[in-house]
């Protein structure tokens, strides 16, 4: 809007604002919020405040819009619920803290469901499941937890693999602020294996070929192994979910319903393929997934969504 035009209409705007109290500085009214969207109880009616970290291809900020697999899923859900998405960039610890202190409505981006986290927040139904992927240097091979004993293993601070790595006999944990540190040290030979979300490893192979990194999948430990070493459960397929404040019960329910609808419609299948994932690995839960949440934050007969 030009300065000349502003000068001509400013008196009119001021008069209207005094009587209506609903006009912006440029003279436009606020977008109306539907009753259904308002009933979801977001911090700002009709707006979904989302905390994300730079974690492509799961989440990234492009201008004032978020992009990536998790972002695409939540953008689709928000559109169906009549919510405008407002992303805020932080780190992984800040994402969790923002939800638990209710400074944001939700956080997304490879967040794993854990019994500890669910005590301080709400998890949606899983939009997808994450297979146990490892980033390794070309020419090296690791298949079982036993192969990891005595090795230098890296992951991101706060990720579920921190506890898993600490439980491996003789292994040394290297924790980094973000995935770039894992790849840098892996390429330099300072660590043997990096535990990160699988699409991140696939993306690094394409974008940083000089690192000579490969993707390998760990053979999941047996039920007996997990019983003897509970932290090993995160070396199995784990469920991701979107994380919300404890007070956001209506919003969590609405988002979970939309996630299940996207499984049924094939929308999630297409999004997984878009980012190079195998829908058979990402959208079909392992048998133990249901038991993880049954009677904890879901009914005793809860079943995870699947294609």
Image (cartoon, rainbow, N blue to C red):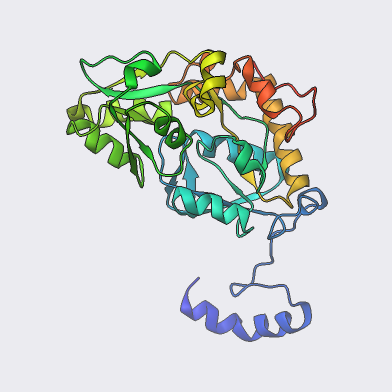
Q: Nearer the viewer, residue 223 or 59?
A: 223
Q: Position of residue 32 (x, y in %)?
A: 74, 58
The answer, for residue 217, to whether it is visible in the render is: no
Q: Nearer the viewer, residue 152 or 13?
A: 152
Which residue shows up at 78% across the image and 46% down it? 250
Q: Is residue 97 above or below residue 264?
A: below
Viewport quadrant of the C terminus: top right
Q: Is residue 38 above or below residue 301?
A: below
Q: Position of residue 125 (x, y in %)?
A: 67, 31
Q: Quadrant of residue 73?
A: top right
Q: Nearer the viewer, residue 38 or 34?
A: 38
Q: Position of residue 77 (x, y in %)?
A: 65, 38
Q: Position of residue 267 (x, y in %)?
A: 61, 24
Question: Is 59 on the left-hand or right-hand side of 112?
Answer: left
Which residue shows up at 46% across the image and 39% down it? 159
Q: Is residue 119 above or below residue 262?
A: below
Question: Is 128 on the left-hand or right-hand side of 29?
Answer: left
Q: Is residue 198 above or below residue 120?
A: above
Question: Is 123 on the left-hand or right-hand side of 208?
Answer: right
The answer, for residue 230, to whether it is visible in the render is: yes
Which residue shows up at 73% across the image and 50% down it? 248
């Amino acid at each position: 809007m030009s300065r000349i035009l502003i000068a001509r209409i400013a008196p009119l705007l001021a008069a209207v604002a005094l009587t209506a109290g609903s006009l912006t500085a440029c003279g436009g009214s606020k977008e109306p919020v539907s009753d259904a969207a308002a009933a979801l109880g977001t911090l700002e009616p009709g707006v979904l405040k989302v905390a994300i970290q730079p974690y492509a291809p799961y989440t990234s900020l492009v201008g004032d819009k978020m992009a990536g697999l998790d972002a695409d899923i939540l953008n689709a859900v928000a559109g169906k619920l009549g919510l405008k998405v407002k992303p805020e960039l932080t780190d992984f610890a800040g994402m969790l803290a923002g939800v638990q202190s209710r400074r944001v409505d939700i956080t997304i981006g490879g967040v794993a469901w854990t019994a500890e986290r669910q005590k301080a927040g709400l998890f949606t139904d899983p939009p997808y499941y994450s297979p146990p992927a490892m980033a390794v240097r070309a020419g090296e091979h690791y298949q079982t937890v036993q192969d990891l004993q005595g090795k230098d293993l890296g992951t991101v601070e706060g990720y579920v693999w921190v506890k898993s790595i600490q439980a491996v006999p003789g292994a040394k944990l290297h924790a980094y602020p973000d995935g770039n540190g894992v790849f840098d040290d892996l390429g330099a030979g300072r660590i043997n294996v990096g535990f990160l979300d699988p699409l991140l490893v696939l993306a690094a192979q394409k974008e940083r070929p000089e690192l000579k990194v490969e993707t390998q999948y760990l053979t999941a430990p047996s039920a007996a192994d997990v019983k003897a070493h509970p932290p090993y459960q995160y070396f199995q397929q784990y469920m991701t979910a979107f994380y919300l404040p404890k007070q956001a019960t209506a919003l969590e329910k609405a988002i979970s319903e939309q996630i299940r609808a996207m499984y049924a419609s094939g929308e999630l299948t297409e999004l997984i393929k878009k980012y190079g994932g195998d829908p058979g690995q990402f959208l079909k839960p392992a048998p133990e997934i249901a038991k993880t949440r049954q009677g904890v934050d879901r009914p005793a007969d809860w079943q995870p969504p699947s294609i």
